Amino acid sequence: MLAVVTGASRGIGRSICKSLSESGYVIAALSRSKDTTEQIAQEVKGHAVICDVLSSVEIQQSWSQIDELKIPLGCLVNCAGISKDGLLVHASEADILKTLQTNLVSSMLMSREFLARAIRHAADTSSVHPKSRNRSIVNIGSVVGLCGNVGQSVYATSKSGLIGFTKSLAKEYGSRGIRVNAVFPGWIDTQMTHAIQAARRQELEKHIALKRFGSPEEIASVVRFLCSADASYVTGQIISVDGGL
């Protein structure tokens, strides 16, 4: 089965690729960075698909490449994301649109393509027990999309939009045996959070029950569960993985 992962070249996306590969999925790793995408694809013995999710044309081209692999689709993980922090009054229209397109709209476009193919496959296997027709979408949000944060109004909006999208899609396609869930990480050690100053990090950790930032691998393990047959009765859920923030 094929797992399609966007934002695959680093951080959480990279860990998701490795975790799903270890569970038996063939990985189609999508990212705009040619070198790092090819590197992670080589690490997981998967396939590199160079795609900037800001472009609907590139998304379409990516799915054409995925179709050529001739591997049955198992899951889609929408992990591509960007953040440009700052007060809303200082945000340019271009930055607002770029954040929404990358974090929210691309998940919709990727999911639309996945669903069109997954529905056809589901029709072909309609006589098979539902648990063995494991197809799922997992959207990667952020705890900021649940509680907001100063200087991240645009980013928070792009991530909170995934809540309604996930829940609606789960209801639309549950009858087809396709599950849709979202994982909302808290503060995770990634390139995005490395810029946080030590004093600010210590202050943030005070508000986390486990008193530490999480690791990309801890997010990947939850995604791995949601993409597995063990989660065959889990859909429409927003799962916070935040250490008790």
Image (cartoon, grey):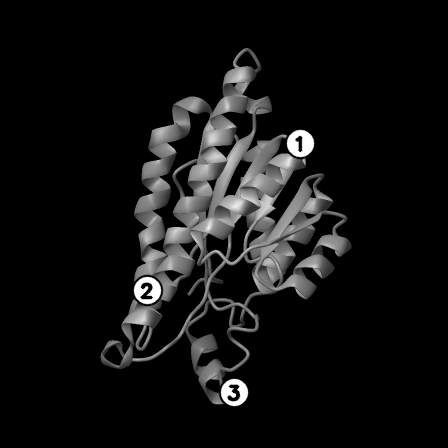
Measure how far apart labels 2 and 1 are at the Cα level.
34 Å
Q: Which residue does the numbered mark 3 point to in the structure image? A: 198
Instruction: State which quadrant residue 129 falls in.
Output: top right
Residue 103, image x and y in percent?
41, 58
Residue 181, image x and y in percent?
44, 42
Q: Which residue does the numbered mark 2 point to in the structure image? A: 97
Q: Is residue 60 left or right of residue 149?
A: right
The residue most toward the top is 127
Q: Tell which of 217 and 25 is nearer to you.
A: 25
Residue 161, image x and y in percent?
31, 53
Residue at 25% across, 76% down: 88
Q: Amino acid at mark 3?
A: Ala
Label 3 near label 1: C-beta < 8 Å?
A: no
Give the crowd class for mark 2: few <14, some 14-19, many >=20 residues within 10 Å.
Answer: some
Label number found at residue 70: 1
Q: Amino acid at mark 1?
A: Lys
Q: Tell which of 103 and 189 is nearer to you.
A: 103
Q: Amino acid at mark 2?
A: Leu
Secondary structure beneath dot 3 equals helix
Residue at 41% across, 45% down: 109
Determine whether 161 is above or below 88 in the image. Answer: above
Measure how far apart labels 1 and 3 are at the Cα level.
48 Å
Q: Is residue 182 visible?
A: yes
| Disc 3 versus disc 2: nearer the observer | 2
